[in-house]
């Protein structure tokens, strides 16, 4: 087990009870997709795993170790092993693609070294390799915000690859992209999962993408897991339980 | 593992408990505000309207006993007022029952407070239309204006030199202010400091100190420093420097507070430490606003440098003060024209530069 979640609760300061006792585990090499409506707690769940959000109660085990309450240096070491990709890409807009990718390495670089930005050749080579993996080697020197949405997300993926992550979290990585670009970005996640063996946990909206890429699916509804299983097993009835009676499936090709 | 006893409660209970606590806290605040309202009304009615207007007293009588007794009376009235549904503060804090009585009374009391404040203000400022349009007053104004519009260009070179001194005072104060302001602004940005109690305390103390420094006008700082380091440009420069650091630290830290959180989240998710997060996620987002604020501040400082010259801060202001003291209005006219011109040029240049960098 690379990741185990036990009875996780999150209550925000404003009283929102975003996670209500979520438990599941993830095996190494899985491509786990989390689905559910907006506000069902998907983002909270992902952010609780790498402690961008402090869970209110419950435990998160990463590689068999309880990481729910670790702090400081220990927490940073764990964070370096978990990559994350966001819906809004979250690149530093005014900096070059290359320095954005190198930012992924910050956790294992010295503070002083990273401030004067004098990196060893090895770091640069690694960054170029990551850019090559996502197919934008030639854009290394341009400013991040001059790229298209799909390209920016690929830079963000390269940034997380720079961490050599054991686990890659993706919070609705294609929600602000058009259908065609969505598919191509998802293919990079698939490639990372298959070729590098990285475990991926990904929040998604579109069932067609889920069926195509997921090896296992978890559905959240109002902070609780309502479905756990294979993507091919999600039928009409399950779909209605997850998304409500009114919902109709939208195809994206 | 740290056990949190609050977790034993059901979340719904927790929310209700918090709500009750908040209501209690709001009620205490409402009582205090009501006491203030009552006390304020009594004092204004008594001192400004009764003593000053009706009795037309020059020296207002003052006794600690009376003030204390009045306060005690207000406390009693305030507490009983806050516990009725007519209370103004209960409505302001949103804990009053919403009904017609509370709506009517808040309107009546609100208008009452506004009216007595305005009337007292009128009395205190001694507004007098008569003295504005009196014949000898108008005569004096005419003499002054006609001299001002015939400036004496004989002192142009002296004035020019003083003007340049003023611009340099402002420039040096702005430049020296940059490094300390940068450093301080990170410690006074809420989003960077709220994480643990120690850093939040530092944030809070720094904010209080900065607010204090900022609330003292550069003019007062100039007086302080002209005693400290002696009258002259140096005193003026330090006065500006102190005020610039305090004001710009606020602007800078507000810029830091309004950055996009996304990149910060992304960089901290990679396992970067605090310094790295600030340097790689915060700094790139604030370079431009910082530059813009600093240039604007130089512009403001040129204007302020002329003012603090009046109290011995050097430059054109000191020169203006000398000629004004001698009642040589034609020379004063020239200096005023020069100040207006330089301020206009600086305003234009700084606006253009700020436009260009955005």
Image: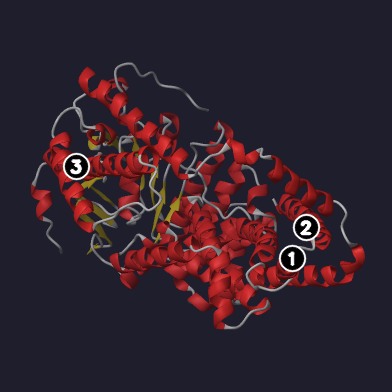
> Which residue is identified by label 2?
B336
Question: Mark 3: which secondary structure?
Answer: helix
- The picture quadrant where one finds residue B219 is bottom right
Q: How far apart are marks 3 and 1 (CA)?
A: 52 Å
Q: Is residue B75 above or below residue B297?
A: above
Q: How far apart are marks 2 and 3 (CA)?
A: 52 Å
Q: Residue at x 22, y 34 (%)?
A: B90
Name the chain under label 3.
Answer: B
Residue B320 tag number: 1
> Which residue is identified by label 3?
B31
Q: Which residue is drawn at 47% across and 54% down?
A: B257
Horizontal arrangement in the rendering, residue B266 relative to residue B130 (left or right): left
Q: Which of A152 and B155 is in front in this view?
A: B155
Q: Distance between the residues labelled 2 and 1?
A: 8 Å
Q: Do the residues labelled 2 and 1 touch (CB within 8 Å)?
A: yes
Horizontal arrangement in the rendering, residue A151 relative to residue B16 (left or right): right
Q: Answer with mark 3 or mark 1, whichever residue precedes in sequence.
A: 3
């Amino acid at each position: 087990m690379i990741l185990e979640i036990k009875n996780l609760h999150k209550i925000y300061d404003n009283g929102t009870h975003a996670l209500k006792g979520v438990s599941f585990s993830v095996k190494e090499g899985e491509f786990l997709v989390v689905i559910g409506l907006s506000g069902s707690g998907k983002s909270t769940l992902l952010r609780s795993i790498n402690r961008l959000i402090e869970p209110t109660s419950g435990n998160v085990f990463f590689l068999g170790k309880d990481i729910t309450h670790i702090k400081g240096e220990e927490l940073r070491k764990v964070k370096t092993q978990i990559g994350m990709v966001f819906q809004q890409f979250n690149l530093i807009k005014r900096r070059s693609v290359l320095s954005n990718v190198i930012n992924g390495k910050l956790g294992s670089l010295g503070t002083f070294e990273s401030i004067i930005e004098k990196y060893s050749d090895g770091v640069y080579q690694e960054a170029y390799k990551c850019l090559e993996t996502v197919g934008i080697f030639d854009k290394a020197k341009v400013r991040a915000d001059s790229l298209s949405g799909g390209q920016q997300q690929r830079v963000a993926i390269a940034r997380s690859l720079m961490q050599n992550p054991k686990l890659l979290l993706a919070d609705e990585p294609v929600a602000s992209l058009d259908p065609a670009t969505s598919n191509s970005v998802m293919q990079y996640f698939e490639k990372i999962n298959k070729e590098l063996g990285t475990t991926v946990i990904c929040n998604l909206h579109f069932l067609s993408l889920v069926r195509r890429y997921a090896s296992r699916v978890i559905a959240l509804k109002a902070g609780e897991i309502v479905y756990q299983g294979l993507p091919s097993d999600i039928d009409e009835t399950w779909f209605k339980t997850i998304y409500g009676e009114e919902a109709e499936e939208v195809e994206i090709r | 593992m740290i056990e949190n006893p609050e977790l034993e409660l059901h979340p719904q209970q927790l929310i209700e408990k918090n709500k009750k606590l908040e209501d209690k806290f709001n009620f205490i605040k409402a009582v205090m505000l009501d006491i203030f309202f009552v006390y304020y009304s009594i004092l204004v009615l008594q001192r400004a309207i009764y003593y000053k207007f009706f009795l037309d007293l020059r020296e207002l009588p003052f006794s600690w006993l009376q003030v204390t007794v009045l306060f005690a009376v207000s406390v009693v009235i305030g507490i009983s007022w806050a516990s009725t549904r007519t209370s103004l503060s209960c409505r302001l804090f949103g804990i009053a029952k919403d009904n017609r009585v509370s709506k009517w009374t808040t309107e009546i009391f609100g208008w009452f407070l506004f009216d007595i404040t305005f009337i007292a203000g009128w009395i205190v400022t001694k507004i007098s239309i008569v003295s504005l349009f009196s014949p000898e007053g108008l005569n004096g104004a005419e003499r002054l204006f006609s001299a001002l519009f015939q400036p004496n260009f004989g002192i142009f070179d002296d004035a020019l030199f003083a003007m340049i001194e003023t611009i340099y005072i402002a420039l040096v104060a702005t430049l020296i202010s940059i490094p300390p302001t940068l450093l301080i602004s990170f410690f006074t940005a809420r989003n960077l400091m709220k994480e643990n109690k120690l850093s939040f305390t530092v944030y809070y103390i720094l904010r209080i100190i900065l607010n204090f420094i900022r609330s003292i006008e550069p003019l007062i700082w100039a007086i302080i420093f002209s005693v400290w380091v002696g009258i002259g440009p140096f005193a003026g420069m330090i006065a500006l420097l102190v005020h610039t650091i305090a004001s710009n630290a606020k602007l800078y830290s507000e810029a830091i507070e309004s950055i996009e959180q996304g990149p910060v989240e992304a960089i901290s998710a990679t396992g970067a430490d605090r310094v790295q997060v600030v340097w790689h996620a915060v700094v790139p987002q604030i370079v431009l606003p910082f530059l813009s604020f600093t240039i604007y501040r130089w512009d403001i400082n040129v204007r302020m440098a002329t003012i603090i010259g009046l109290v011995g801060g050097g430059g054109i202001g000191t020169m203006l003060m000398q000629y004004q003291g001698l009642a040589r209005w034609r020379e004063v006219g020239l200096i005023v024209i020069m100040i207006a011109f330089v301020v206009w040029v600086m305003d234009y240049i700084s606006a253009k530069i700020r436009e260009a960098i955005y």
